[in-house]
Amino acid sequence: MAQSQSGKKLMNMVYGLGAAVVIIGALFKIMHWPFGDEMLIHWSCYRSRSICCFCL
């Protein structure tokens, strides 16, 4: 999928979005704000899937 220029750009954007939300989830967890656990779990799974798709 990531062979074309637009495919590479899309995958980089998806990967970056996942990383940003995981960092925000870590902030929520450190500050003991609500939903920190859920953000880390769900977006870590999302990021893992996007990494797998990126590598294929």
Image: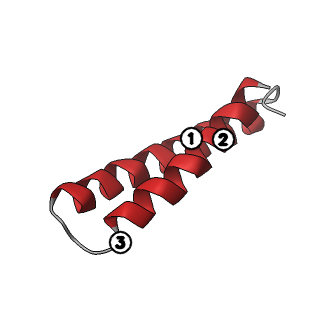
Circle 1 or circle 2, nearest the eye: 2
Residue, disc 3: 35
Bin the neighbour count of mark 2 within 10 Å (Cα to Cα): few under 14, some 14-19, many 20 and up.
some
Circles 1 and 2: CB distance less than 8 Å? yes
Residue, disc 1: 15
| SS label for mark 1 | helix
Pointer 2 or 3: first along the chain: 3
| Mark linked to residue 34 | none
Residue type marked 3: Phe
Q: How far, Cα to Cα, is label 2 from label 3?
A: 22 Å
| SS label for mark 3 | loop
Frontmost residue, 31 versus 12: 31
On the image, the x and y values in percent for residue 12 come to 59, 37
Residue type marked 1: Tyr
Frontmost residue, 12 versus 44: 44
Bin the neighbour count of mark 3 within 10 Å (Cα to Cα): few under 14, some 14-19, many 20 and up.
few
